[in-house]
Amino acid sequence: MSTQQTLLNSPFDYTEEFAEEFASLTSSCGATQYSYTQPAAYALGTQSSETPLPAPACTQTYTVKADDTCNSISTAFNVSTSSIVLGNRLLSDCSNLAAVGTICIPQACNIYQIQSDDTCDSIIVARASGVSAPQFLAWNPNINTLCSNLGTLRETYICLSPPGGALIAPSPTVSLPMTQPTTPVPRPTNSFPESNGNCGKWYNITTSDTCDEVSISNSISLKDFYFLNPEIDSQCSNLVLGVSYCVQAVGDIQTYPGYPVTSRYITLTSNTFATTTSSAQVKLPLPSRTATSLLPHASGTTENCFAYKNYREIPAIVDQSQGTDLALYTSFINSCDYTRSTWSVTLEDLVAWNPSLDKNNCTMKPGFSYCVLKDENYKPSKQHALKPPPHCCSITVC
């Protein structure tokens, strides 16, 4: 239940229904140590009542009607729900849409409404064949790297294609589109000298602006925005209110000096091979798999069990090491709920085989192994029926 306690303290996961289920669970279990504080509502952006923020820069606007929702606007203009929320500084649940009045409509894409049983893999395979996972996540920045927050985004719309269409680098013999500036505009007096002067458009920073919002509102990638304004650090922590930054290149940005471009092509040199003859076939040894060594048994754990399980820690990768999901998933796969569902045993038997486990807060400890199947022909006793397997990060049955 500590996992649910952590989620209820987060503004991203707290809901009234979730809180009611957790209260019922702790009451039925008699657990009193899992307290939490209801987090304040999370808003992607707010507007000052004294100085209203200007509408985000965009080429198309729309006046909100009384019965409009973010989803209805998404389907009307083929845009993702999150791009409407981020581009117009709306609350994450879109509850303040009616009060905004006129909103910016971002670039269109092929949209899809998330269903309750969707995963990133299932969406890509069934709906976006040929699309890679990095592309899918780049078009939908509201989906986290592990794709573990789709449940909170169900029934909203996401992009299955690049917003605004696929980017095609113009060849030297093809003239640039009319929408792409061919000459720079004058540099504003309130810009930093480090910003690239060869700029087709400047944007003045207002209250609550972030690099993400500026890039979405002006249809420029974060990579290009940082390149045109090298004075901004990688965390976007030094964006200055009232300063103008370059948000559009003149012509093809890949032709700018110093722009990091990765070539698609490599040059291979031919090799010269010596010929030889073989009188007999040489049999190579088959690859072998090295078994994982068993950790020391936990205190009191039953000896001579049919199967033991080591405490397992998920190895960190670059993306995971910067977030909280790593600890959450490590806790989940070492919980008794996960273990008993994997091995089809009851919680009561698992605790009986491993007396060091606490039934009320049952989780394995680092550095030890535990008995997870006493006998190959194990059958649960009638008074302890098997319970349905848990799902990560949801309410479990005690």
Image: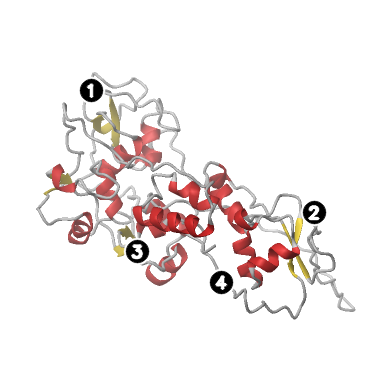
Q: Is residue 98 left or right of residue 208?
A: left
Kindly identify which residue carries mark 4: 387
Earlier residue among tags 1 and 3? 3
Tell me if residue 33 can be seen: yes
Quadrant placement of the N terminus: bottom right
Q: Residue at x 64, y 64 (%)?
A: 339
Dot 2: few (<14), some (14–19), or many (≥20) neighbours within 10 Å? Answer: few
Q: Position of residue 109 (x, y in %)?
A: 28, 58
45 or 385: nearer the viewer: 385
- Horizontal side, residue 372 vs residue 84: left or right: right
Image coordinates for residue 224, horizontal then vertical, percent:
37, 39
Q: Earlier in the sequence, mark 1 or mark 2?
A: 1
Using the image as rendered, state which of residue 356 and residue 281 is in the foreground: 356
The quarter holding residue 289 reads bottom right
Q: Which mark is residue 299?
A: 2
What amino acid is labelled 3 in the image? Answer: Ile
2 and 3 marks in contact (CB < 8 Å): no
Q: Quadrant of residue 42?
A: top left
Mark toward the start of the polypeptide (3 vs 4): 3
Above/below status of 52 relative to 162: above
Q: CA distance from mark 1 to mark 2?
A: 71 Å
* Image quadrant in which the C terminus is located: bottom right
Q: Amino acid at mark 2?
A: Ser
